[in-house]
Amino acid sequence: MTMHLVHPSLSTAGKKKGKQKFRNAEQARKARELEDSWKALQKKWDVQPVNPRQKTVAVPLSKSYKLEIPTGRTTAHIKSLDTGAGVAVKAEPKVYTGTMVKGIATMHKSNAVPVFSDEEAVAISSMRR
């Protein structure tokens, strides 16, 4: 399904999470405790929280990198590998000798059909439009 067929309410652009509301004070307290324990665990293992809006920065290449052709690759032409097997011979053209076909029948609307047996000839002659 392409995006132009989807209703605008299903769009993923511009959906920001608002302030979280809880049913009662007990659930709010549990959520705060869970968040605090998660932050303590991250601090214990020295894990930095990821900010999804923070842009990532690419590490620049070292200054020793140079764009040049490696040595040994300066040739303009690469020779083909000679295996010594020789060149292939051209195959003879395939020509039908006429030993299988008994004749040619005309089927629907001047359609020429090869006939291989007497039974086929009878079947083609008995066909109707």
Image (tube, rainbow, N blue to C red):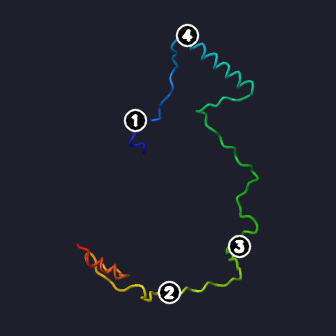
Q: Disc 1 versus disc 4: distance between alpha carbons?
A: 35 Å
Estimate the x, y position of residue 67 in percent, counting from the top left: 70, 58
Q: Disc 1 versus disc 3: distance between alpha carbons?
A: 58 Å
Residue at 71% across, 29% down: 47
| Label 3 crowd bin: few (<14), some (14–19), many (20+), radius 10 Å | few
Residue 38 located left or right of residue 101:
right
Q: Secondary structure at mark 3?
A: loop
Q: Which mark is residue 93?
A: 2
Q: Disc 2 versus disc 1: distance between alpha carbons?
A: 64 Å
Q: Secondary structure at mark 2?
A: loop
Q: Secondary structure at mark 4?
A: helix
Q: Nearer the viewer, residue 50 or 37?
A: 37
Q: Nearer the viewer, residue 11 or 94?
A: 94
Locate the N terminus and report the quarter of the image it occupies: top left
Estimate the x, y position of residue 18 in percent, counting from the top left: 50, 23
User: Residue placed farthest to the left in the image?
Assistant: 129
Q: Which mark is residue 25?
A: 4
Circle nearer the N terminus (1, 4): 1
Residue at 67% across, 22% down: 38
Q: Amino acid at mark 4?
A: Ala
- What residue does disc 1 label? 8
Write down the quadrant of residue 122 in the picture. bottom left
Q: Amino acid at mark 1?
A: Pro
- What residue does disc 3 label? 75
Q: Are marks 1 and 4 in contact (CB under 8 Å)?
A: no
Circle nearer the N terminus (2, 1): 1
| Label 2 crowd bin: few (<14), some (14–19), many (20+), radius 10 Å | few
| Label 4 crowd bin: few (<14), some (14–19), many (20+), radius 10 Å | few
